[in-house]
Structure formats: C-alpha cells, structure tokens
Image: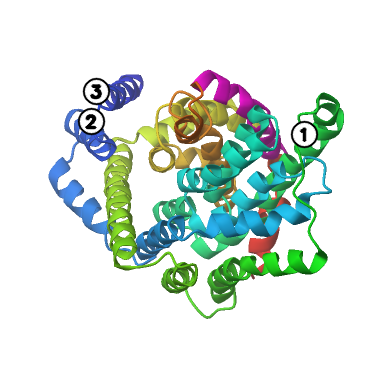
C-alpha cells in the first residue's frame, strides 16, 4: 500500500508540476496505477468510465448554469445591484463596504462562478470605495472573500459536480447550501461592523456614505433588484416547487438571464456568441476533468488503495473530528495548487471510502468540501480570486493575502460551527422529506 501510495502521489505531482492538463494528469496517474499495481487492462476500464461520466442527465445542468453565468457576467447586473444597495447601507457601520459582501452574495447566487463574481463586482465597487476614502485592504478583503460564495449559494457548479460524482441529490445539495451561505454572509458583515466601530471610525478609514436620497428614490432604485430576485426565485422555486429538475431549472435560468440582459441593454448577437463559446469551453474542460477523475477513482478501486487506506485509518481509531481536521489541512495544501473543481474531483475519487467509513453524512461533507474549496480561492499561490484582485488593483499578492486573512479565519470558524451544529446544513434537506 505504501509503494502504491507514493507512486500515485509522485506521478500526480510530477504531471501537474510539469504543466500537463489536469484531466490528462488524472488519466495518466490512473493508467500507471492499473498497469503496475492492478490485474486488469486499463483500456476497457478507461472506455467504460469515459462513457459513464459523459451521459448522465444531471451533468446536463452544468453547461446551462455556466452559460447563465457568462450571460449575467456581461449583462450589467452588478452595476444595478450597487446602485440599489448603496442608499440602504448608509446608516450601517461600514456603510458601502457591505455592498461588496451583499452584492457579491446576490450576484454569486445567480452566477455560480467565484472569479466572475469577483471581477464583475470589483470593477465597479473598488474604484468607488477608494474614491470615498474607505480602507483599501478591507475593500479588497471583503470582495475576495464574499465572491467565493458563488461556490456555496445555489445554484452552484461545484455542487453539481460533487452530486454527479458521489451520486447525491443535487436538489438536496442546493438547499443545504443556503443556511451555511447565510452564515458566512452574517460572519463577514458582523466582522465588518465590529471593525468599523472599533477601528475604522476612529482612524477615519470607514469612508464617506452615499449621498442622502429620498425614501421614494431609494425604492425606485431598489426596483433594479427585481430581475435578480425573479431569476433566483425562478430557478430555486421551480426546483423545490416540484415543477422542474435542476437541469430543467438551469434552462429556465438561461432564458431568464437572456431576458435580464436584454432589459439592461446588454444583449446582442456578439454577447450571445461570446457567452455561448465561453460556456462551451468551460463546460468541456469540466466534463473532461470529471471523466479523468472517474477513471482515477476506478483505478484506485481496482488497486484497492482506498479500502486499504480506510482500514488503516480505522485501525488508528481517529475520531470524525480529528479526521476532519486532518482532511482540512490536507485540502488546504492541495488547494494551493489545484483549482476548485479539480480539488473536489480528486478528493472524491480517493477519500470517499474514508468519509463513508467514518459515518459522515455525504450531504454535510459536500457543503464542508465546498467551503474548504472557497478557502482555497483566497490561499496563495494559486488562489484564483487573489489573481483577479491583483489584476484589478495592481497590488502584490502578499498585500492581497494579508487583506483576506481575517475572512479566511472566519471561514475556518464557519467550518467549526457546521461541525458542532450539523443541523445548519442538514435541516433544510431533511425538511424536504
């Protein structure tokens, strides 16, 4: 088992470190494991896994949600959100800094992409917050961390991928992410309020509020949020109202996003084609990685490495709490070098027997895994959100990482709370019964 584990890890590390595409790295690692440590021909297994990973109906939702996000990325929706939210946040400690958190949370709910949320909201809020005298590091930290909620608040591409490869209900995963997403939003905003009262107001770095606006004007500005709320309600309402499957709801979301973009005056033939081809490239990349991870998972099963590893850890007598601590550290290290989807697929192809053996609920583990992936988005050296912020601000990675550290620690606190109170995740899925 030790030899196989070392060969597998070294092969994967060498292929990834050598710049090989992630899907090919997963395929190559599985092929070597089967060739040298298995008793089956890898060719038929590869063909079977590629077919099995490519025709699932649930997987059809993936390109549709990606396409919806690409359309909304070009629709001007983020600008509307900022104008609608800013007047209402004027009296809250932290003022317009909350627009990064709430705006990112709302946009994430319909976009599903952390990087797209970060880029779209940041292009508009960062210059405005700087002009009004807000603390630059806190503006960066709130944007980088809150934009990761696109992975957790449904509809989430990560949850679709996890649900497909672990054969869990995507509908249950979607609804399980709502309360943890609100928990993270609450933690971020609470920290921001505390910082503003204790530090920001005293140092004069809490910035200027928005210009005073009559109540009627506030209501008229808030009407710009109606299309967004209709989109969220149309997607989630159709799923949990029993009117549509997640795949069918994704198609509804694409149509509604086109209507929103058209209403904003940001939809024409060029935008349609650009969004379509961008979604096609992203969806094909994800599907190819899923197929590679499926083959690696089968290779590990045929070599019996996961079973032996699970038995070895079981003999160590680790409690579920200690196991989660070890897994969190392991995943954070992997997250420094892999993107979120690759991390989820790699983990689910290797350690799921450990999770099942420890008696951990797979819906709960899916939400935990997505939050850890969110943390990896703001972890150097391959935190995608850090690169997006660097492109927007020109600041160095060390400065951006330091700005996101408090929010990284809040995410760790959220994981601890979910472990102590698993009902935060499981209450809504159980209520679906």
The answer to whether residue 150 is magenta is no
**Picture coordinates of residue 318 (x, y %)?**
61, 28
At a point 49% along the width and 61% down the height, the residue shown is: 170
Quarter of the picture containing the C terminus is bottom right
Residue 307, which numbered label? none
Q: CA distance from mark 1 to mark 3?
A: 46 Å
- Residue 202: x and y in percent read 86, 26
Mark 3 secondary-structure assignment: loop
Residue 144 falls in which quadrant of the image? top right
Between 92 and 212, the residue placed more toward the observer is 212
Report crowding for label 1: few under 14, some 14 to 19, many 20 or more residues within 10 A (C-alpha).
many
Q: Secondary structure at mark 1?
A: loop
Of the image marks 1 and 3, the number of the one nearer the N terminus: 3
Asked if 334 appears above or below 236 in the picture, the reply is above
Whether the residues at callouts 3 and 2 have beta carbons within 8 Å, the answer is yes
Q: Nearer the viewer, residue 145 or 343?
A: 145
Q: Which residue is depicted at the point 17% across and 41% down?
A: 40
In this picture, which residue range is highlighted in magenta?
A: 397-417
Residue 154 appears in view: no
Q: Which residue is mark 3?
A: 18
């Amino acid at each position: 088992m030790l030899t196989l584990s070392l060969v597998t890890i070294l092969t994967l590390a060498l292929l990834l470190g050598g710049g090989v595409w992630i899907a090919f790295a997963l395929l190559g690692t599985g092929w070597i494991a089967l060739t040298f440590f298995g008793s089956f021909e890898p060719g038929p297994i590869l063909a079977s896994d590629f077919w099995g990973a490519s025709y699932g109906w649930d997987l059809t939702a993936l390109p549709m949600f990606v396409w919806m996000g690409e359309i909304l990325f070009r629709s001007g929706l983020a600008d509307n959100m900022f104008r609608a939210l800013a007047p209402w946040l004027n009296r809250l400690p932290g003022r317009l800094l909350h627009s990064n958190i709430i705006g990112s949370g709302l946009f994430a709910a319909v976009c599903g992409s952390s990087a797209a949320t970060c880029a779209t909201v940041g292009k508009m809020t960062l210059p405005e917050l700087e002009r009004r005298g807000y603390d630059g590091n806190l503006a960066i930290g709130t944007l980088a961390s809150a934009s990761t909620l696109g992975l957790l608040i449904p509809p989430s591409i990560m949850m679709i991928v996890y649900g497909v490869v672990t054969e869990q209900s995507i509908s249950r995963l979607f609804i399980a992410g709502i309360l943890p997403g609100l928990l993270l939003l609450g933690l971020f905003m609470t920290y921001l309020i505390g910082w503003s009262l204790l530090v920001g107001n005293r140092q004069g770095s809490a910035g200027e509020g928005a210009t005073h606006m009559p109540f009627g004007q506030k209501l008229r500005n808030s009407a710009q949020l109606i299309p967004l709320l209709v989109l969220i309600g149309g997607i989630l309402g159709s799923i949990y109202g029993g009117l549509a499957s997640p795949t069918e709801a994704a198609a509804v979301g694409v149509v509604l996003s086109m209507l929103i973009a058209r209403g904003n005056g940001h939809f024409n033939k060029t935008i349609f084609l650009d969004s379509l081809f961008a979604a096609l490239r992203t969806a094909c990349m994800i599907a190819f990685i899923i197929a590679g991870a499926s083959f690696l998972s089968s290779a590990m099963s045929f070599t019996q490495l996961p079973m032996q590893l699970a038995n070895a850890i079981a003999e160590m007598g680790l409690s579920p709490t200690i196991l989660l601590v070890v897994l969190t550290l392991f995943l954070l290290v992997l997250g420094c070098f892999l993107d979120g989807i690759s991390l989820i697929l790699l983990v689910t192809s290797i350690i799921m027997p450990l999770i099942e053996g420890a008696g951990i609920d797979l819906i709960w583990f899916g939400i935990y895994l997505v939050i850890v992936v969110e943390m990896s988005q703001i972890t150097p050296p391959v935190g995608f959100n850090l690169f997006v912020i660097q492109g927007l601000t020109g600041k160095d990675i060390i400065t951006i990482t330091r700005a996101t550290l408090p929010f990284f620690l809040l995410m760790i606190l959220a994981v601890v709370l979910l472990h102590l109170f698993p009902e935060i995740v499981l209450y809504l899925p159980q209520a679906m019964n």
